[in-house]
Image (tube, rainbow, N blue to C red):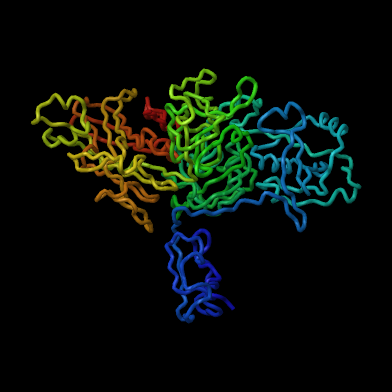
Amino acid sequence: MYQVFKKKSCNRRGKKIPMEVLINIYFFPSGPIWFDNLHCTGKEKTLAQCPSNGIGVSDCKHSEDVGVLCSDKRIPGFKFFNALPNHVENLDIQVEDVHIRAILSSYRKRIPVTEGYVEVKDGGKWKQICNTEWTRFNSRVICGMFGFPGERKYNARVYKMFARRRKPTYWDFSVNCTGNEAHLSSCKLGQSLLQKSNGTCPGGLPVVVSCVPGRAFAPTPMIGFRKAFRQEQPLVRLRGGAIVGEGRVEVLKNGEWGTICDDNWNLLSATVVCRELGFGTAKEALSGGRLGQGMGPVHMNEVECSGFEKSITECYFNKEALGCSHEEDAAVMCNVPEMGFQERLRLNGGRNPYEGRVEVLVERNGSLVWGTVCSEGWGTMEAMVVCRQLGLGFASNAFQETWYWPGEVSADAVVMSGVRCSGTEMSLSHCLHHGAHLSCPKGGGRHAAGVSCSETAPDLVLNPQVVEQTTYMEDRPMFMLQCAYEENCLSSTSSQVPANSYRRLLRFSSQIHNNGQSDFRPKADKHAWVWHDCHRHYHSMEVFTIYDLFSLNGTKVAEGHKASFCLEDSECDEGIEKRYECANFGDQGITVGCWDTYRHDIDCQWIDITDMKPGDYILQIVINPNYEVPESDYTNNIVKCRCRYDGHRVWMYSCHNGGSLSTETEQTFPGLLNNQVTHR
């Protein structure tokens, strides 16, 4: 017997379920009817949250039963969790926690802890594990779950001496791991050792592990963390993640970065990626483009790993990624070492844990004190680092005044000033700052720096193919360029020419996609938008896009810019509704899965090349150049093209997104090797 609404008609990937289940649901309905007159908005998590007559209240017959057919397309915000539980469990045996306890004094003073006893918390007490049946595979798993890619040998004699001085308290069981487990909870429990040995460890000692940290987490003294190491891996990288060790997996093939399709994607494969990048094992193997969608090709599909490969490229995979789109991009969340960064920073005075005045813990006169951060120059990049350090995701706003957030009065004094971050640092202390030589004219308190954080962020990506395919040249008379002249969309020499002269314009279209996890909204609220009477429209961001032409040695020869005069959803992927339309003073923005198109034939969608000599050039387009709006990934905000101009015609070729090609391929664009452009 089957009940209506008891079975789901699609699984977590949006695929159809087996036919026999559909037959049971659709052709043999029986039992109670639980819902009638359902009215859902689409945002509810379960049907029980939708307004209805009430559970079990119905005047329907089974001839009126409803069914669903799910689309293969994932909706924005789709989430799938497959994290392992944080405990070992076998029948009635449960472990409350596991840790590595540093024993030797030289390791107790280091962060992170890389060597010591493996201890389990059982019955509220920490206990050691007998090493009689311990293997290197067990050590590999322990190191992985604490954020380290591998294990190494240690000096056993020192630990023998320590064990003789202090009698260990042993756990009752042994552990049996194969070495490819992502967490101790996936290992099998061995036999009870203490039942045979009267509570001792026969011929053995407490288990000790020594782990090899990744290059970004090399052990350092307690005070003065080493600056974050910017990892540049030759074959694999992570993009779009809010914290270190998290992101969409991208692999390099034939000089071009591409993604991995999530078919068969699991913790084994995700762990290979994590270890390859210098992290530990994977906490989660994420599917469905959950950490944003990539651009370019899908390089791998149906990846299957044993867990012992040194690189994801050594795993078996289907070379044909047929049917895979970027909606199925695979991602990972890796275990990373506990660095203690969160303990040196806090948000205070906010309405919720995701916002507040930034307060940092620093050493002053031999003691640790809390204080504020000078807000002079405080911006999006600095706010991004704060949110990452606290594990709160991405920044949604950076504030230079926090009088509305009363923090701790004892922490009003400024203890950090001149902060400048690239946005990739793991801690605010890794950013450039004045150190002990503070300089902050406004002071702290109500003028201190503040942030608000968000679990998700937008990600704007310009379509390079559209730029390449729509480029052309036009000679346009000055009398038709008055509005553009008023908005400074022409070169400076245009002010010295007669009204009957012409300007030569390099024109092209821009198609700007939002591939992130939340909508892109302009920084300014409606009341702050600027009305331009000549063009009859509002600017919500005065500089939204910058267009530059460079010579091959990197010298700028021409430039243009575009304000966000009408930021809206021009088109969307199938199944996604437009939300933003700027007509009639409507809301401006770009919905996730939609794009805004600035056509080649609108004003200011050009570069004035009237004074440019024939030759070879490089076109560079930068979206959101001043980082006014936070994004999950700024490396893909740039498009570069090779350009040839012979005085009569123009050719555009080799257009690509910044960071989409290998370093070697990028060297064909001399003078412009750095994808990160700062206009602050």
User: How far across and down, in percent of the image, does residue 49 sit?
Assistant: 50, 64
Q: Is residue 211 visible?
A: yes
Most extreme residue toward the right, as rendered? 198
Q: Is residue 242 above or below residue 642?
A: below
**Residue 79 relative to residue 459: left or right:** right
Count the numbered circles shown: 0
Could you say which quadrant of the image residue 69 lies in? bottom left
Placement of the N terminus among the 4 image quadrants: bottom right
Name the residue furthest front: 409
Specify whether residue 649 is in view: no
Residue plotted at (51% across, 58% down): 13
In the picture, the quarter occupied by the C terminus is: top left
Most foreground residue, 315 or 517: 517
Could you say where residue 202 lies in the image, as x and y percent from the top left? 89, 43
Please name whichever residue, 641 or 332, is drawn nearer the observer in this view of the structure.
332
| Position of residue 5 measured from the top left corner of the image (x, y, whole percent) | 52, 71
Q: Is residue 109 left or right of residue 531?
A: right
Nearer to us in this view, 363 or 587? 363
**Residue at (77, 57) in percent of width and height:** 92
Image position, residue 472 (x, y; %): 22, 38
Q: Residue furthest toward the left?
A: 500
